[in-house]
Amino acid sequence: MPKTATERIVRIPEPGAPLPTVSTHALARIGYQDAWDLQGKLHQEMVALKLGNRDRRKTEQPELPQTHHLLYVEHPPVYTLGKSGSVDHLLMDEKQLAEGGFTYHKINRGGDITYHGPGQLVVYPIFDLDEFFTDVHRYVRCLEEVIIRTIADYGIPDAYREAGYTGVWLPATQTLPKRKICAIGVHLSRWVTMHGLAFNVNPDLSHFKNIVPCGIAEDDRDVTSLSKELGRAISLAEIQPVVDGHFRAVFGY
């Protein structure tokens, strides 16, 4: 019988094979630059260990174990522009940014412009994909799968992937357009990942009005949050362990 789309995406470890070890960091609210610096530090350490293990294999020395990282954070209000984005999609000038309490960063992830802020769960996997699978497309689909499963746990079974876009969407209804609930942008170097996903749990959605979110300007699309869809407030403390459980299930560690 053919495998379903989900079965093709999710990583199923080989029987008896060692599982990757992932260290989870719950960093609560942290400035964007501080989080970016931490990602860079962990990324450099993992790449250095990886290259060192290559040298050890050449001399038949035992390899040192790799530890992957999963950072759960919440940022103060910030707009970030990916390397393929347009600065024209930021609809504020420097004075308006300062007056509104926003910061702005041009960064090295893929994708266009997005917003991070209180009430949004941002997850940064620092994974060496050589220990999972070396397929960027599949990696992004796995990130989407984590959030699709999480949303389903809250009684929303129809979250989906929109063809031609990254992230997780909810379908249009008679009164609502298609709504994006999770944005994704990643960067890889030597198959070690940075950046990740931004899951709208209970953020101030009006802050998305200051940008063209992810560069998508169509009138038939909008941004939403889990709390808005459910009609009740969901905290990051409640949702984080649910997301974490699905990361373990989807990535097999």
Image: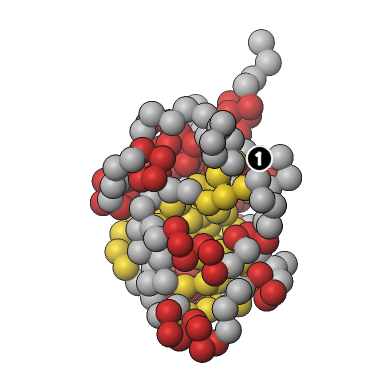
Q: Which residue lies furthest to the front in this view?
A: 175
Camera-nearest residue between 61 and 229: 229
Q: Is residue 137 left or right of residue 156?
A: right
Farthest bottom residue in view: 95
Instruction: Estimate the x, y position of residue 245 in percent, counting from the top left.
Output: 36, 39
Q: Which of 134 and 58 is in front in this view?
A: 134
How far across and how far down the image is residue 54, in percent? 62, 61
Q: Locate the N terminus and report the quarter of the image it occupies.
A: top right
**Residue 146 screen position, x and y as percent:** 48, 40
The residue that label 1 is drawn on is 162
Q: Residue at x 28, y 50 (%)?
A: 235
- Residue pictured at 69% horizontal, 74% vertical: 88
Examine the rendering and report whether any part of residue 51 can be seen. no
Residue in the foreground of this view, choosing between 88 and 70: 88
- Its colouring scheme is secondary structure
Q: Would you identify the image quadrant in which residue 206 lies?
A: bottom left
Residue for point 62% across, 21% down:
4
Q: Quarter holding the C terminus?
A: top left
Q: Position of residue 205 (x, y in %)?
A: 44, 58
Q: Residues within 10 Å of mark 1 (few under 14, many from 20)?
A: some
- Regarding residue 199, the answer to whether it shows in the image is yes
Q: Of the residues shown, which amino acid type is indicated by label 1?
A: Glu
**Residue depicted at 70% across the width and 68% down the height:** 85
Please count the marks in the image: 1
Q: What element carries label 1?
A: loop
